[in-house]
Structures are given as C-alpha cells and as structure tokens.
Image (cartoon, rainbow, N blue to C red):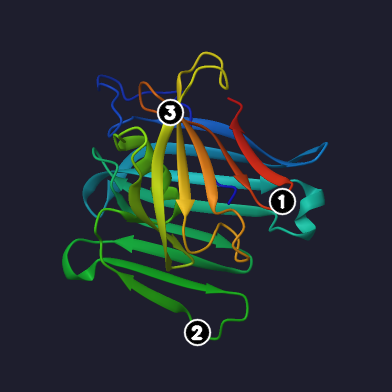
Amino acid sequence: MIRLLLIPLLLLLGHPVTVTDPGEETSLYEVRFLYGSLNTKVAKATFTLTPTEWEGHDAYKSNISVRVQPIFRLFLHSQYVVEAFFTRPGMEPLYYSTSTNKGSAWCRYSEGEEGIVFWRQFGKMPEPEIFHHPNDGRTFEVVSLLYFARTHDFEEGVPFEVTVLMGGRKIRSTLTLEGYDTEKYPGHKAQLLHLHMVDRGIMENKSGQDVYLWTDAEGTRIVLGLEVALSKNGTMVCNIIE
C-alpha cells in the first residue's frame, strides 16, 4: 500500500534516457493519511534504481524501503523492504521480493510454461502458499505494475485490462489514462492514471478499489504521487518530496 517511486538524480553516462532504460534513480516520498481535518505523516519511502545483472544478463535492481512513524507502529510494521529486478533495457519484471518481521514473499516472472510463480509465508501459516499464473504481459504485483504504468503508452479514456497480484491472488483491474494536470505538481505536466480493481481493493475489506497515480508526462515518466481512499472519509496520499 505504501510503497512508491522515483525521481532521477544520476543518469547512466553516455546513454540516452528513455522510459524503458531510465538509468540510475533515487527518490524520496512522504506518505500521509488524511481524515477530515487530520493530516498526519505516516511514513517515508526511499526508492533507488541501479543497473546490475540478473542471472548473467543486464538488469535493473529496484530497492524500496518504507519507514513508518513510531505512532503508527501499533498498526503497521516498523519497516517494509522491497527488492525487484527488471530487464535492461525494457523494464520488464523478472523478480520481486518483500519481507517484514512477520514473514516474506517473492514473485518470479518467466517465459513459457513456467509463467509467474508467487510464493508467500506470513504469520502463523504452517506452510507457504504458492500460486502459478500465466505470464501474459498484463499480470503484475504492485511494484512491477507501477513500472508498467511508466512504460506503457495509454490511449486517453480507454481502459486497459490488467491483473494485479495481491498476496499471489489475481485481481481483475483496469488502468485508464484520465487526462493531464499541470497544476498539482508545479514544474511538471502530469498524466493522471486511474487503477480500478474489480474484485477487491488494496485492503482485504475491499476498500481502496480505486487508486489514482500521477506520473510525469515527459522524460522517464517518474511517478509523482499516488492517492487511494481507504474509508468513507480517510485517504492515503503519497507525494514525491525530492
């Protein structure tokens, strides 16, 4: 829920910057919870993207670290750590993993019959859960979905069908380019993407079915912010701060 993305600081020397080969990136996001007049900082998220190798091939490695404010550690883990690998160039997903002090999960993307394998074991689960899905180029866990939103050219107003893997289970969804915004993030022309999850939302109680994502409309299309309503009056927002 509170894992987001990026603003470039360093670029690969001598390489053009493209959506599918963005170069080296570092960014910082602030996560806040809005409830009526309440506006509270929940966490900070640090994101990095670095060139590396994956199984002998050029790749990108993405690291995301989310540190939760002490007051919210009664309800959330104190820290969330995510690691993901993507093809270089191309930014197609290869591998994703996450862990907390309660357990871990990983997702591996392969071609052919092997497809997508999602493994998870948390809490008091006696055995890990393992899910298998076809790799159709439209099925992603949340981090890879955010990268897909950066790289895909959407037709404005036309829903694009995707599948979101939440805990390994498939959630039918659509991504729609709603339009452009030149005021929300000064200095940026932002494109507004709307993720609608049909079967459930970010939360297991089905709240958070609609996620709004702002990405830069130019350059490498960095993610500028995200907003999701988690209750009738409560909204989680995440904005880039540097």
**Residue drawn where x is 23% and y is 37% of the image:** 89
Can the viewer see residue 26? yes
Q: Which residue is mark 3?
A: 179
User: Is the residue marked by circle 2 packed among few (<14), some (14-19), or many (20+) residues within 10 Å?
Assistant: few
First in sequence: mark 3 or mark 1? 3
Q: Which residue occupies the extreme top position in the image?
A: 187
Q: Locate residue 132 relative to residue 185 in the image: left or right.
A: left
Eyeballing the image, is 132 above or below 173? below
Percent x, y of residue 185: 56, 21
Earlier sequence position, callout 2 versus callout 1: 2
Real-space Cα separation, disc 2 to disc 3, in angstroms: 45 Å
Q: Which residue is mark 1?
A: 232
Q: Residue at x 36, y 27 (%)?
A: 220
Q: Is residue 156 left or right of residue 232?
A: left
Where residue 231 sits in the image (x, y, percent)?
70, 53
Q: Mark 3 is on which residue type?
A: Gly
Q: For the image shown, how many numbered marks are present on the structure? A: 3
The percent coordinates of residue 7 (x first, y second) are: 48, 27
The label nearer to you, 2 versus 3, is 3
Mark number, residue 202: none
Task: Quote the CA–CA distance across marks 2 and 1.
Answer: 36 Å
> Answer yes or no: do the residues labelled 2 and 3 have beta carbons within 8 Å?
no
Q: Secondary structure at mark 1?
A: loop
Q: Quadrant of residue 115?
A: bottom left
Q: Disc 2 or 3, which lies upstream in sequence?
A: 2
Q: Is residue 177 above or below residue 12?
A: below
